[in-house]
Image (cartoon, rainbow, N blue to C red):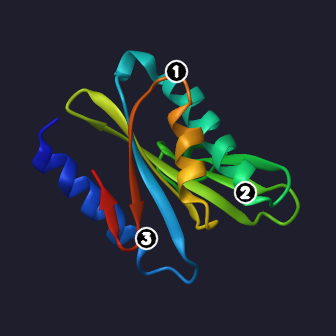
Amino acid sequence: MSETANADLYRQTVELLQPGDIELAGAVVHTAYDNDEESKLHQLTLDAGTAIASHAEKGDTYVYSGNDSNEFGVNQHQGLTIDGDEFVWECQQLLREGVFSVVLYWEATGDHEAVLDDIRAVDGVEEVVAVTEDGFDA
């Protein structure tokens, strides 16, 4: 993936975080997974969501997926609380130049580095680029 294409993705992710009613933090997760490894990508997404939810301290969560509703794209997933369907995290899986990247965002917890470290520890993660409303660390 070219540096320019990645920088554009990071800038778009920053813009995604900015207009919200709550302060959001995020990450772009690069993988080596291609179309033939969607089951591994799915597990990576669930594990990254679990890592985020463990820092959110909002209780038990479940994953609401694009294939559950016509309001979402197929590769879009959201972590919600079991009690009240409160937002915990959201992601979009993007196939770019033959491999998947996952754009994740969540309500800022004040411990962005700890969340990122837990995401980095997920099987299949090649690189994690931190994103906040203020910019990105590439």
* Residue 77 visible, this angle: no
Marks 1/2: CA–CA distance: 22 Å
Q: Position of residue 96 (x, y in %)?
A: 25, 37
Quadrant location of residue 100?
Answer: top left
Q: Is residue 7 above or below residue 47?
A: below
First of labels 1, 3 by sequence position: 3
The residue under the point 76% across, 47% down is: 62
Q: Along the line of sight, which residue is nearer the eye, 57 or 93?
A: 57
Callout 1: few (<14), some (14-19), or many (20+) C-alpha neighbours within 10 Å?
some
Which residue extends farthest top? 36
The residue under the point 28% across, 56% down is: 10
The residue under the point 60% across, 40% down is: 118
Q: Position of residue 24 (x, y in %)?
A: 52, 70
* Residue 88 visible, this angle: yes
Hey, what amino acid is under mark 3? Leu
Q: Which residue is mark 2?
A: 80
Q: Position of residue 103 (x, y in %)?
A: 42, 49
Hey, what amino acid is under mark 2? Leu
Quadrant the N terminus occupies: top left
Q: Along the line of sight, which residue is nearer the eye, 113 or 62?
A: 113
Q: Which residue is mark 3?
A: 17
Marks 2/3: CA–CA distance: 18 Å
Marks 1/3: CA–CA distance: 27 Å
Q: Which residue is mark 1?
A: 40
Q: Is residue 129 left or right of residue 62?
A: left
First of labels 1, 2 by sequence position: 1
Q: Are marks 2 and 3 in contact (CB under 8 Å)?
A: no
- SS state under label 2: strand
Q: Is residue 138 left or right of residue 35?
A: left
First of labels 2, 3 by sequence position: 3
- Can you tell which mark lies on residue 25? none
Hey, what amino acid is under mark 1? Lys
